[in-house]
């Protein structure tokens, strides 16, 4: 395969001339040094011991180092006269798929199936959670109890939610985050009927593409973490509308008040515009 040498620019030629003059000067200095050492070594009968190292130094120091001063490569976004479009950076071959970019699991990557938001959390979200930190579980994925995976997904979602979402939506999802208290537009509460009845894929789509005053977070939150946040949102919604009979017996004593079994926590109202 033939190699094409890149065209030289005027400033490149000037740099090469300067470098060549410097190399010639270095060679002369080293030859003078070698001659002096040989003369001194002859006096102490070390000529045979020093001749090989000195010859090695003379050959290595005199190597052409022009490529170190001006490497024969293109800089980022540099123009090219070799390619017809004038670009040095080449586009990927048509049909090329990067590693990890196949995205054949449509519900997992889009939150939709047949054009409609999916309701349950996709199973691939748990697999992605495991692949992120397999050492956290200390056992193969297919041997982990589902409740352990759910708890790990909720914990990951809580962490991501408090980083990216709580500043607007508040830590409990009531829409009273810190920047809202500073005058930013108030988002609706997650606990209104409209959002409690929304499918999980709806929240995933909003995080991915944005909605209303909310911008897209797809560049900051990866796909697996979006589903973790959605899972935590469902836990928040349940926490504000759970019945006492749904609370495990060993945790009921932790509640500050006792409610009848058929009582529910009052629902938040959607804020007025």
Image (cartoon, rainbow, N blue to C red):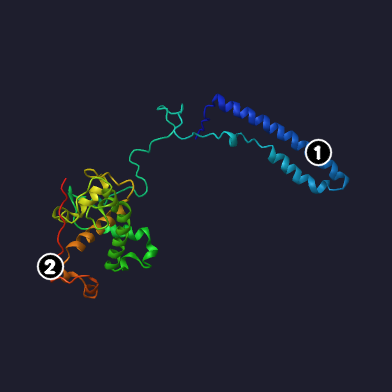
Mark 1 closeness class: few <14, some 14–19, many ≥20 residues within 10 Å: few
- Residue depicted at x 63% and y 36%: 65
Residue 112, how many percent across, how many down?
A: 20, 50
211 above or below 132?
Answer: above
Q: Which mark is residue 263?
A: 2
Residue found at the far left of this picture: 262
Residue found at the far top of this picture: 10
Q: Do we see residue 129 in this rendering? A: yes
- The image quarter in which residue 225 lies: bottom left
- Residue depicted at x 82% and y 47%: 48
Q: Which mark is residue 23?
A: none
Residue 122, how many percent across, how many down?
A: 24, 57
- Residue depicted at x 57% and y 33%: 70
Q: What residue is disc 1 on?
A: 35
Mark 2 closeness class: few <14, some 14–19, many ≥20 residues within 10 Å: few
- The image quarter in which residue 232 lies: bottom left
From the viewer's perspective, is 18 left or right of 152? right
The secondary structure type at the circle numbered 2 is loop
- The image quarter in which residue 229 lies: bottom left
- Residue depicted at x 46% and y 35%: 76
Q: Nearer the viewer, residue 239 or 31?
A: 239
């Amino acid at each position: 395969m033939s190699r094409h040498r890149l065209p030289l620019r005027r400033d490149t030629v000037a740099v090469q001339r300067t470098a060549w003059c410097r190399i010639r000067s270095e060679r002369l200095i080293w030859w003078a040094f070698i001659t002096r050492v040989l003369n001194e070594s002859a006096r102490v009968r070390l000529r045979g011991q020093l001749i090989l190292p000195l010859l090695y130094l003379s050959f290595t120091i005199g190597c052409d180092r022009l490529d170190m001063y001006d490497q024969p490569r293109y800089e980022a976004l540099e123009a090219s006269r070799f390619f017809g479009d004038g670009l040095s950076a080449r586009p990927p071959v048509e049909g090329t798929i990067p590693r990890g970019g196949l995205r054949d699991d449509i519900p997992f990557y889009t939150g939709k199936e047949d054009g409609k938001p999916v309701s349950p959390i996709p199973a691939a979200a748990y697999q992605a959670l495991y692949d992120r930190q397999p050492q956290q579980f200390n056992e193969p994925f297919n041997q982990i109890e589902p409740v352990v995976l759910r708890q790990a997904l909720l914990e990951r979602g809580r962490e991501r939610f408090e980083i990216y979402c709580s500043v607007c939506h508040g830590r409990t999802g009531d829409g009273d985050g810190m920047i809202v208290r500073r005058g930013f537009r108030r988002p609706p509460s997650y606990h209104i009927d409209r959002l409690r009845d929304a499918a999980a894929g709806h929240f995933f789509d909003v995080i991915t593409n944005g909605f209303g005053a909310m911008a897209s977070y797809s560049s900051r939150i990866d796909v697996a973490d979006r589903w973790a946040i959605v899972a935590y949102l469902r836990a928040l919604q349940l926490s504000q509308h759970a019945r006492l009979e749904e609370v495990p017996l060993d945790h009921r004593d932790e509640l500050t008040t006792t409610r009848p079994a058929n009582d529910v926590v009052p629902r938040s109202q959607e804020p007025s515009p």
